[in-house]
Amino acid sequence: MSLSGVFRAEKKDGTIYYRSSITFKNKHISLGSYNTELAAHHAYQRAKELLESNIKYSELSQADILDEYSKDKTIKFNKFISIINFRDNGMYFKNPIYMCKRFFMYFYSTECVFTFDIEDLFYYASHKIAKRGSHLFVADYGMQVNLMQRYGIRSHAVLNRDYRFINGDKYDFRYENVEIINRFNGVQQIVTPDNTKYKAIILVNGNFIIGTYDTEIEAAIAYNKACDIIKSKIPERTYRQNYIDSLSPKDYARIYLQLEISENIINYTP
């Protein structure tokens, strides 16, 4: 007779392994595969203990959840999160999500826990976060979608120069916590006690200062203008130019023609 919650299985090569599962509120939950029957049974016992517990993690902190997991790592981490969320909140997600009243936590790992607004719940319930180096993305219809860009953070943007997290937590992507400082490519905000200016910079064998402007729109258009000049001199050079959706084509053209840019750009020789 097999142990509770354990099912014997066989791989194509004949290797025997054991699958563990549990049913809670008419939901069948797979707990994973194990090399031994005893290990699979321990996973079942741990899941049963969690599901029968009176602890409400929604009343505790992120650290409390991680502490509870560290007591017994019999169940895989993402499954542990899914189980306690289902018990406490009545919704089962394959992704490691734990719901709170106005936000939810996505437990990528024990060291990396994201916080999102509740309106993003069903996106991350069906899209798994992945990480390669410092690059965060989700798989969406076979494409890698940059997670940062969902929140208006440009590719190659620099933390605390182009954007910042107001509470200092770089994993807290609640909309009120993400502040975009520089929205456009090649634009840097310069804040002094007297005023705020915007510097446009372009990379051509080193950084070239295009000019300093009163508004970020002017600086963004100046960057586009510099890109056009450099590309006319070096056709193979590519730049990601700024899209200014707040201006009509006529207003854009007027500002483009009137803006002055550095002579170093105009006279640049490859």
Image (cartoon, grey):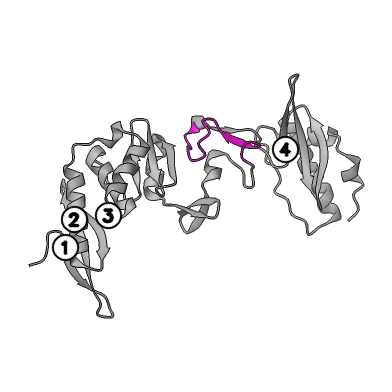
Q: Residue furthest top?
A: 194
Q: Residue furthest bottom?
A: 13
The circle drawn on residue 187 is 4
Name the residue nearer the viewer: 119 or 197.
197
The circle drawn on residue 44 is 2
Residue at the disc numbered 1: 6
Nearest-to-viewer mark from 3 and 4: 3
Q: Earlier in the sequence, mark 1 or mark 3?
A: 1
Q: Which quarter of the picture shows residue 19?
A: bottom left
Left/right placement of residue 170 relative to residue 32 reads right
- Residue range corresponding to the magenta coloring: 159-175
Residue at the disc numbered 3: 75
Q: Earlier in the sequence, mark 3 or mark 4?
A: 3
Q: Earlier in the sequence, mark 3 or mark 2?
A: 2
* Residue 265 percent location from the top left of the image: 87, 45
Q: Please tell me whether residue 252 belongs to the stretch shown in magenta.
A: no
* Residue 70 percent location from the top left of the image: 31, 48
Secondary element at tag 1: strand
Q: Label 3 neighbourhood size at 10 Å, few (<14), some (14-19), many (20+)?
A: many
Q: Residue at x 70, y 48 (%)?
A: 240
Q: CA distance from mark 3 to mark 4?
A: 48 Å
Q: Name the kind of residue labelled 1 in the image.
A: Val
Q: Is residue 27 visible?
A: no
